[in-house]
Image (tube, rainbow, N blue to C red):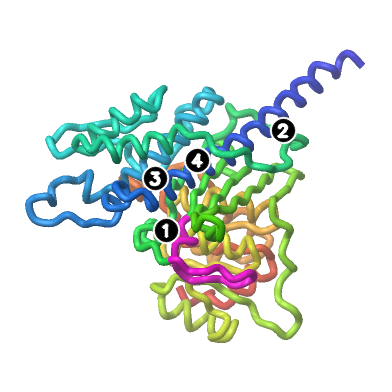
């Protein structure tokens, strides 16, 4: 009996650690959502967010690109908070944005989250050319802890160690919808193609060795407006998929359309015409739906608002797909590389074409190193995936 005690103790400790990691990611995602909301509701920040400088001010990158600063602040806040609690993950926490800025004086400033709110405000003021009001508002949101998020993760048993994991962060997915700020009302059970609700905070966890997504947190900062104070409230989703363990905060949607009904497919409005025509032949024109944001489109599949998301272009990145991919895996689905899957002769090879997150494409430079170059199909049901692949074979 004593021979097995140390192994049992290690497993218990590891499981507790993984439950704590999920709790932390939910908490920092809500902090990120708060920052996103503050940037829209506080006048000094909102003006920087939406105004486009012209003429002599055009070289002031910090104002012109405040939306990128908001992204970077969120990204670095998540990187900071995770690194403090899990130092073994430092160096494997990746994000969409560079954290280096040039201010109006031509000085290069590296954006980080400091130990105190005052220090962070001072650093941000140097990026914002001395705008201390905006810097203080932003720093306050970064250092403010959110209310406790209720989620039953204490009993979660995941046989993984933080030293085996990496993280992808998309601080504000669908940035254009976030900037435009259209306040659409979400209807239960219906996909809404555009608006603030398409902007998501995405945090995905993957295995360093294989690149498999094993944990994902999605926060939708602008889910609904509270009638009591008119303020925006968010909603969060999470999933864990590791070995035989598959658990998600959402119940699995019903498995596919009823007999006689066709698949519903969500697409980008800029999708290739040949793809639209091929899927129209399969599904019918009324079953092709268009929406903004890669993360939101995959979330629609997760929620059962669409059966499948198809993208033929290599216009998404690892930070877009990692988090929602983990949730789909927990629900029995996944995200495949469309080009690779079209080249397969058998549906039995579906798992070989799933997207992975640990290796860059060394033939590319910059952000393109982490692009999902082959396009993708996000799905909940393997039979539906095969129907889509059959419809597109020989067309791309």
Other residues around mark 1 within 10 Å, as few (<14) / some (14–19) / many (≥20): many
Q: Are marks 3 and 2 in contact (CB under 8 Å)?
A: no
- Indicate which label's residue lies in the foreground, 1 or 3: 1
Tell whether 283 sits left or right of 77. right
Instruction: Residue at the far front: name it.
Output: 228
Other residues around mark 4 within 10 Å, as few (<14) / some (14–19) / many (≥20): many
Q: Which residues are magenta?
A: 183-199
Q: What is the number of the mark on residue 31?
A: 4
Q: What is the number of the mark on residue 159?
A: 2
Quadrant in the picture for residue 177: bottom left
- Residues at marks 4 and 2, CA–CA distance in whole angstroms: 27 Å
Judge whether residue 336 can be spotted in this image: no
Q: Earlier in the sequence, mark 1 or mark 4?
A: 4
Compared to residue 323, the image places residue 283 above or below, namely below
Residue 126 placement (x, y as % from top left): 23, 32
- Indicate which label's residue lies in the foreground, 4 or 2: 4
- Indicate which label's residue lies in the foreground, 4 or 3: 4
Q: Earlier in the sequence, mark 1 or mark 3?
A: 3
Which residue is labeled 3 in the image?
A: 96
Tell whether 85 sits left or right of 36. right
- Residues at marks 4 and 3, CA–CA distance in whole angstroms: 18 Å
Q: Which one is in front, 183 or 208? A: 183
Q: Are marks 1 and 3 in contact (CB under 8 Å)?
A: no
Q: Earlier in the sequence, mark 3 or mark 2?
A: 3
Residue 66 placement (x, y as % from top left): 28, 47
SS for callout 1: loop
Q: Earlier in the sequence, mark 4 or mark 3?
A: 4
């Amino acid at each position: 009996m004593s021979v097995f005690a140390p192994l049992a103790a290690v497993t218990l400790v590891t499981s507790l650690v993984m439950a704590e990691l999920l709790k932390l990611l939910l908490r920092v995602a809500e902090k990120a959502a708060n920052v996103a909301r503050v940037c829209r509701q506080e006048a000094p920040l909102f003006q920087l967010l939406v105004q486009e400088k012209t003429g002599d001010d055009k070289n002031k990158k910090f104002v012109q690109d405040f939306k990128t600063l908001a992204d970077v602040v969120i990204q670095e806040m998540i990187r900071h908070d995770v690194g403090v609690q899990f130092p073994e993950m430092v160096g494997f926490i990746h994000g969409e944005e560079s954290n280096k800025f040039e201010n109006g004086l031509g000085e290069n400033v590296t954006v980080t989250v400091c130990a105190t709110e005052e220090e962070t405000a001072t650093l941000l003021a140097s990026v914002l050319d001395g705008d201390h009001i905006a810097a203080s508002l932003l720093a306050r949101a970064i250092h403010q802890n959110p209310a406790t998020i209720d989620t039953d993760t204490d009993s979660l048993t995941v046989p993984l160690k933080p030293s085996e994991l990496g993280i992808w962060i998309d601080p504000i997915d669908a940035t254009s919808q976030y900037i435009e700020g259209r306040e659409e009302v979400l209807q239960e059970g219906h996909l809404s193609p555009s608006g603030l609700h398409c902007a998501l905070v995405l945090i995905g966890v993957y295995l360093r060795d294989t690149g498999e997504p094993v944990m994902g947190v999605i926060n939708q900062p602008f889910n609904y407006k509270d009638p009591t104070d008119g303020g925006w409230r968010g909603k969060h989703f999470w999933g864990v998929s590791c070995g035989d363990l598959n658990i998600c905060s959402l119940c699995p949607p019903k498995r596919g359309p009823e007999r006689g009904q066709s698949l519903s497919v969500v697409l980008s409005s800029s999708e290739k015409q040949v793809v639209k025509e091929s899927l129209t032949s399969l599904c019918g024109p009324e079953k092709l739906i268009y929406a903004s944001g890669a993360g939101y489109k995959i979330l629609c599949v997760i929620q059962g608002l669409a059966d499948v998301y198809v993208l033929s272009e290599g216009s998404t990145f690892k930070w877009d797909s990692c988090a929602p991919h983990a949730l789909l895996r927990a629900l029995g689905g996944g995200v495949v590389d469309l080009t690779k899957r079209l080249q397969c002769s058998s549906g039995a090879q579906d798992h070989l074409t799933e997207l992975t997150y640990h290796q860059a494409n060394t033939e590319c430079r910059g952000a393109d190193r982490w692009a999902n170059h082959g396009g993708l199909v996000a799905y909940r049901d393997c039979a539906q995936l095969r129907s889509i692949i059959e419809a597109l074979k020989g067309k791309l």
